[in-house]
Every structure is written in C-alpha cells, then in structure tokens.
Image (cartoon, coloured by chain):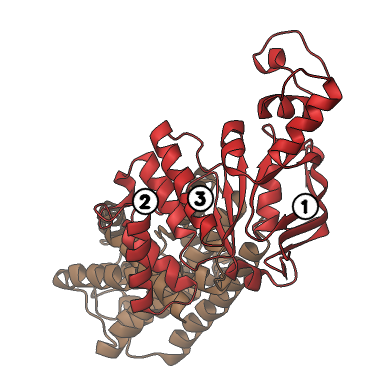
Chain colours: A red, B brown
Amino acid sequence: MPLAVEAHQLVKRFSGRGGTVDAVRGVDLRVEEGEVFGFLGPNGAGKSTTVRMLTTLMTITSGTARVAGIDVSDEPDAARRGIGVALQEVGLDPRQTGRELLVLQARLFGSSASQAADRAQELLELVDLVDAADRRIKGYSGGMKRRLDLASALVHQPKVLFLDEPTTGLDPASRLTVWEEMRRINAQGTTVFLTTQYLEEADQLCSRLAIIDGGLIVREGTPVELKAELRRRRSLPQDPSLDDVFLDATGRTRERIAGQVQEVQG
Amino acid sequence: MTQYWVLGRRAIREVLRTPESLFPTVFIPIFFLVVNVGQAGRIFPAGATSFLKGQNYAAFQLPSALLLAASFGSAALYLVEDIEGGYFDKLRAAPVSRTAIVLGRLTAEAAKSVAISALIVLIALPFGISVASGILGFVLLLVLAAAWSVVYSGFVQLIALKSRSAAATQSGSLVFFPLLFLTPNFVPRDKLTHPMEIAATFNPVTYIMEALRSLILDDLDWTRIGRGFAVVAIAGVVMVALNVRAIRSYD
C-alpha cells in the first residue's frame, strides 16, 4: 500500500535566549493511503509541531518527511497541492463572507473564477453553511467557523487532510457533525491525519494511531492492538480503555491527571 | 498573477469594510497641516518668501501632510490579525507565491493612498494651494505618495512578520515621526542648520518630500522628481525582498 505520510527521524529544535528545546526528537511515521490516522499526546508533547513540519508550515531541523509522495522540504509547493490543513486555531478571515473565503482559497489553488464559485457552493452545501454563506465570518458561531475551516481545507480535493484538534472547544452536537464530515471525506478516499486530545474521538474514528510524548513516539498500532497489548502486559481481566493505554504510554496516572499528589512515573 | 490579484482584492475589501480606520488617516495629516501653517505661516508670507514661489505656506507644508497620510498604513495591523487568527498559516499552507502574499496587501495600500492623497489635495485647493506642475504633476504626486505608502507599509509589515505582535507593530510604525522631522519639513534644506542639513541629506524621506514639493511649487523639475522616484523604487525593492524573505523563513 502506498504511503500518504512518511516521516523518518523527524527532529525540531527551537533555539532562543532561554536555551535550546527539542520539541520533536526523532519521530518515525508511516501512514497508509485511505487511513484515518490518530496522533495523540498530552499538551506540549510535540503533536502540533510535527503537524506543522509535515504541512510545510515549519522548517525541519533534521530528518525527512514525505506527504502524498512528495518531500515537504525539497518541493514545498508541490506538497502543498496535495495537502489540506485545518489547524487548531481556525484559520479564517473574519471580514470576509464564507463564500468569499472559499472562492479565494480555490483561486489560490489554481481554479478559474467560475470553477472556484462552483466549488465554493459545493462545499457550502457539504458543510451545511449555504444559508450563512454571504454573511461575514465574524458573526459565525464556533461550530460554523470550524465547519467552514474544514471546507476551506478541502477546496482542492487534497490527498491528505491534516486536522489538528478539530473538535476542541465544540459542543457535542458540533463535534458529531465534524466526525460525520471526517468519515465522509475519508470514505471519498482522502487520508486523514488527525491530532486530538479526546481519546473517545480517536477510538471512534481512527483505524490506527500513534501516541507521542516528550517529542518521541511511545506507542503505535490499531486501537484494538494497543488495548490488547496493555491487557496482556498488565494481566488485566478485561480489555482496558484507550484512556488507560494513553495513561500507560505517557507515564501518567488518573490521580495525576486529576491533579492529585499521588504520582507514578512509568 | 491571479494569486496577486485575488489577494489584492481581498485586502481592498478589508479596507472598505473597516471605514473607521480611514478617519485618522485623513484627519491627522490635515490637522498637522493646519497647525503647522497656523504656527509658521506668518513667518513666511507668500509675497516675501522666495522659496514659496508665489504660493502660501500651506503649499510648502502639503507634502508633509501627504507623506504622513501615506505612512498611516493599516496593512501591517491586518497582517498581525491574520497571524494571530491563524489565517496567515492558511495562506502559507497553500501553494501561493510569497511575493503575491506581500504585494497583495501593499497594492491595496497603494490604492488607498491614491484615494486619500487625492482627497487631501482636493481639500487643500480652496485654500489657495495649486499644483504648479499641472495634471501630469498631480498624477505624479499621487503615484509618488502611493509608492511611498508601499515602502513604508512594507517596513511596518516587516516588523509585524518579525514580532507577530500588534503592540510592537504599532510602536514600530511611529518611526516615521523622527524621519519626518529630519527632513526639510519647515524650510528648504539649504536653510537648515548644518547638522540638520546633514541629517536631512542622509534621510531618504527628504528626497521624496522635495520631489512632492517641486510638483506643487514648480513646473516639472525632472531632476528632483527623478530623485524622489529613484529613492522609492530602491526602497520598495528592498522592502518587498525583505518581506518575501521573512515569509519564506517564517516558522
């Protein structure tokens, strides 16, 4: 199976007045075409930094990364044509209307004016924003902005869609809508690379996942495999949840997460 | 070219949808014009001051007002909003020419500057100011002011790209005031004190001001006009190149 995302010993080092920080310390990734791949990790683990390197938004200190078969450092523009990006912070211009934003985005990817208008209409229908299409974005709700952001990442029908915590801050209904969109997009053949802090989301959507902590991949596999491995290793009477896998992989305990003093470093 | 065009149109829409940001751009330069003329106009009476070439002191001060208006660009602040709101990353993640990202906004600044400069000149006409170089001179006046707005907005945009902070960008934009006061703002360069004359000679804004002033007070003086355009052309190329480099290395 061809690979949609392939990273080898990816490193990102930040240097500043306060010294040097290795945010990502040698990440290897292999995501097959058509997968919904979950990328999990606690805050500050290196998830967003990895996504920013894979999407050409950040330079790579060392290592290599290929997305849709293209080296992101050597041919960034070619890589960008195959990538759709919806980052943690919705990237929208509040002074434009939803339609204007989508048309502009389509034109930036090379569509003619009429193609861009058609594609914008198609996407507005897809994310159920036709009624709000000609209103300024600053008046949209959080869920509407998230759906529009998702639509803008799809204007050029990308091969790989990167979604960085796409449901953070959304109410349960909006979260379910985004999940449905994600499934629909994936069913059309787009590989989805999803970072999330919601383990239930990863369990529901991802065919395979990796957990990153301290800039390194600490677990990788299907949700079923990861649960079975933990059950075996800990001799548990039943399959653990993905929460348990996450806590085990990141050396955290429920007590620590809850802010209690009791702490076990795995 | 398409990318440049669509990004430029977006930046113009942005300006038109925030008309309140245009008010200080028009009001403050006119305020300075009125105050400066009120303070020094009687020192330099029209009939007895040779460097006024028969016009009143307001004509001499008009270039300062035009340069001030052209230096009140909002492109950099919109850019900081894009950076803070995440839209800048959306643009960077698209296969968009980095030059188009820079020039799109700067072109909108130029268009805004043409409109505001024309308005200021039109407001000044009933007060006895005329453009001695005629229609062509008026057009060159607008083009030169617009070109300066591109240079200065490029400079402030560079601060925005480096600092990613609205506060730093706004503070950086105030650099224009010392630059303006190191020009032959109140009298011609040869009437300045020696240290001020040296400072004005090294200040690129001096040559733009002298070109604008010559268009208002003289017939077409191609040497002065040429110097003004040469300065904005060189500074413009440098600013665009630095902006493009800053976006390319933006992490």
Amino acid found under the numbered disc labelled 3: Arg
Amino acid found under the numbered disc labelled 1: Leu
Q: Is residue A80 left or right of residue A225?
A: left
Nearest to the observer: residue B205 or residue A262: A262
Q: Is residue B161 left or right of residue A95?
A: right
Please name the residue that numbered disc 2 is placed on: A94
Share a chain, discs 2 and 1? yes
Crowdedness near tag 1: few (<14), some (14–19) or many (≥20) residues, C-alpha within 10 Å: some
Nearest to the observer: residue A56 or residue B154: A56
On residue A183, the disc is 3
Amino acid found under the numbered disc labelled 2: Pro
Q: Are marks 2 and 1 in contact (CB under 8 Å)?
A: no
Q: Quadrant of residue B118?
A: bottom left
Q: Is residue B198 visible?
A: no
Share a chain, discs 3 and 1? yes
Of marks 2 and 1, the one in the foreground: 1
